[in-house]
Every structure is written in C-alpha cells, then in structure tokens.
Amino acid sequence: MKKLKKKADWLTKAKKRKMKKKDRGIVEIMMLTRHFFKELPQWLNEMTDPRHPSYTTYSQADLVLMGMLKNMCAVKSMRSMEETFNEDACIATLRILSGDQGLSEMPHADTLNYYLERLSPQCLADVRKKMVKSLIRKKSFSRSRLLGKYWRVIIDGTGLFYFREKHCENCLVTTVTREVDGKEVKVKRYYHKVLEAKLLLSPGILISLDTEFIENEKEDVSKNDCEINAAKRLLERLHKDYPRLPVCLQGDALYAAETIMKMCRDWKYILTQKATRQKVLAESYEWIAGGGGAETLTGIGKEGGNGEYINHVEETAGKEEEADMYRYRYETEEDGEKEIHEFQWITNIELTKKNLEEMIEAGRGRWKIENEGFNNQKNGIYDIEHLNSRDSNAMKNHYLITQIADIVMQIYLSFSPLRKEIGQSIKNTSSGLLESFRRHTVTDEDVSYISKYTTVYLE
Ligand SMILES: [Zn+2]
C-alpha cells in the first residue's frame, strides 16, 4: 500500500521557517488558558495561603503560574528557571496571566520553594479538580467516551525518586543486593512512588485526573499491598469528587483484584486478566470455553484476529463480582516463525458481538501509542524525576504543578498550528514556547484578541 504523504512533507523549508517566525506560543497559551480555564488565577488565589500575610510580595497565582511555565517550557532546574525567566517580557506576561498588577520582578526560586514547602498539596489537587470539571463540561471531548458513554480512567503506578539514604518518614523501602569488595551484601534503598488516575479526553489528550502518593504505612509492606491500598484511597476519592461521572476504569493485571472490582460496582471496569491474578476465574473460563460455551468472532481488529468472550464467568467461579471475560488472538509470521499474540481482559460490561471489537481496542489501549505525551513526563520535557526540592511537601506540590501544567500543555500541543502544519516535535514546540515567553511582549491587541476568541479547534 502506498503511503500518503503528510501535509508537512509538502511544505517548503522557506514556508516552514515563515510559519515558525509567526509562532507566538505564549499568546496561544494565554488564549487557551483563558478559553478553558478562565478562572484559573482566581482559583489559585483562593487557595488557603500558608504564608504570613505581611511578608508576601507575590500572589499565589504568580508563584504557581511561574511553576507551570517552568514545566511547559521544559526548564529543568529551579536555578536555571531563575536565570531563564529573568526577562522584561516574562514579567509582563506573568503579570497579565496572574492578574497581579503589582508584579514587578519574577519570583525567586527560593521564594517558590519556601511557598511550596508550606502549601497543602490538597489545594493544588482541588485546583486540578476545577480544571478537569470545566473540561468535562465543555463537551468538546465527549466523543472519546467508551461505547458513547463512559469516560475512560486509567490507573497506573510509577516510581518518582530514589535515594540511597532514608529521605523522609514516608519513604518506601526496598532491599537490593549489591557487590561490595567482591562480596554480595543486602542494602536498603528508599524511594517515592505515585499512583495516577489519568482521564482520556481524546486520543491525543490524556490528563491527570487524580494523584495518590504511595507512602509507607508500615515497614516492609509488599509492593502489591501498597499499590492496591493506594488505589482504594484514590478510587474512593474519585467517587466522592465525581459522583455522577460515568467512568470505565482501566488498569493492568495488578488491579484485577476483587476489592477493586467491588469499588467499580457503580462504574464500569476493564482490567488485564492474568491467570496468576484471578486463578479461579481463569479456570472457569477455560472450562466453559472447552465445552463450547464461548462466543467467537473472527477477522476483527486491526490485525484481523479472533475475538472470544464469555459473560458472567463469576457465576461458574462462585464469585460475587460481575466478571465478563474476553480474549483477542492474532498471529504474525516473521522469517517463517509464527508468533501468537494473545490478550485477555476482565470487565463488568456485558459483551456482545456488536461491542466486542470496540472493547478489544479499549483493552489494548491504543491511546498509549497515539498519545505521544504518555512518556513525556519522565523522558521528555518535564523530567519529573528531577528533584526540585528535598522537602517532601514541596516535592508533592512540584509534582502536582507538573500535572496541572501538563493539562494546559497537552491542550496546547493538540491545538498548535506548528504541530499540525509542519509536524513539529513536542520538544521543539516546548522550546519554541520558551523562546516566545522570553521574547514576545504581549500587546493590548493580543489581549483583546484573546478575550474575543471563542472557538478552539483541537486535533
Ligand atoms: Zn522520602
């Protein structure tokens, strides 16, 4: 099959340069922030301010917005932020963004850290909640819902910081074997982990819905224990924060636990099924399938593979939670060697011949491939493993600022004409934004254009 050339390939180099010259990333960020989160500065200023009122020079919006820009512009350290943002244009832009007319200098890195050491992380989490709610209300993203109804929420845990020495009271501990002078010794390592619930808004936009910091409740708890416990805390909160949101929870086999399934009774779930995690269900499935009790569909999915499902396996397995199970299998051949690819999931969505293909696609998580930003937080522009502060409270707040910044950034990446027209990479779009923030003086004309802009087209 002949591949169609992308539009970007047809553009001449001169035309691409011309487009780049016209790039006013920071103005677009202002426009999008205003369009989607008009009250953001107000939400930030309404947080409970932990500082003594007589010593405050900067508003909370000044500080958090600067932290967000540090992330969006891929500035790695606090010190380089201080140098990079020390420009008249930056001050003028921050003044407009935060609405703080009295702002005359960019805040110091120390000032931001001092503030983040004291601010309750709950405050930033609440601001994120307001942002997410206003996005859901916009309806522009409702097309990506599963079976036209369910918002897809994906939970996943990830390691953040690793230390040789105990860093704080809540550090997770693991024992590793190291060779010291030719002898094997066991040493302790300390680390921090987060559990994220991401919300899929479109194939290109996957945003942070909620965060649970995985902390040590007692010494030497197993890895699974603390992730499942963190998931329970997170899911409880999601039910409370979004009581009417139709959710389909997705996750890997680790979360295919009865406690998690139980918490999804008023939601839907799709979890990766592994025989090692749900043994009785797996055996029951094989038993029913062996007797010809499975429904099958052939030639489906991108690879033209085979789908198979059995509803209500829990009845045979003697389990309480609804467990409908399905499979997808396809074969590939490379150098005469056949390889079988097999996937299996467990769900409480009743499977039908009509929905099986969409359910397989959902289970396989194509958004992971389509969403370039998925790995961005670690390997790309944000570098979330960089420690901006050793203080554990500031650490959480820095992490939450990254998540808030990422919401704006993903919308920007999805909107950016340079991304759409010339296929500019995420990294270059981010450094272009930094250039624009440092060089462009936002004019009154820009501001009036921004306030008149009412329709935003995203990819
Ligand atoms: Zn720690």
Image (cartoon, helix red, strand yellow):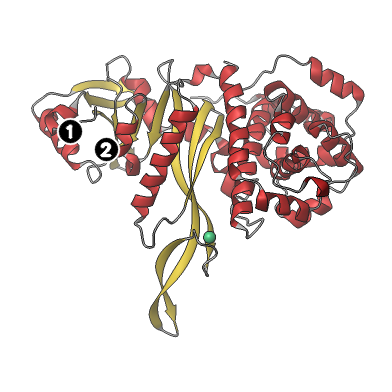
Q: With respect to residue 147, does 80 lie above or below?
A: below
| Ligand 1 neighbours mark 2 (CB distance < 8 Å) | no
Q: Is residue 31 visible?
A: yes
Horizontal and vertical percent position of residue 28: 76, 27
C-beta proximity under 8 Å, tags 1 and 2: yes
At a point 26% along the width and 41% down the height, the residue shown is 274
Query: With 284 as the anchor, is 63 left or right in this view?
Result: right
Camera-nearest residue between 438 and 232: 232
Mark 2, other Cα within 10 Å: few <14 / some 14–19 / many ≥20:
some
Q: Which residue is mark 1?
A: 319
Secondary structure beneath dot 1 equals loop
Camera-nearest residue between 29 and 210: 210
* Mark nearer the N terminus (1 vs 2): 2
Horizontal and vertical percent position of residue 227: 39, 48
Mark 1, other Cα within 10 Å: few <14 / some 14–19 / many ≥20:
some
Q: Which residue is mark 2?
A: 258
Q: Quadrant of residue 446?
A: top right
At a point 14% along the width and 27% down the height, the residue shown is 315
Say which amino acid is labelled 1: Lys
Say which amino acid is labelled 2: Glu
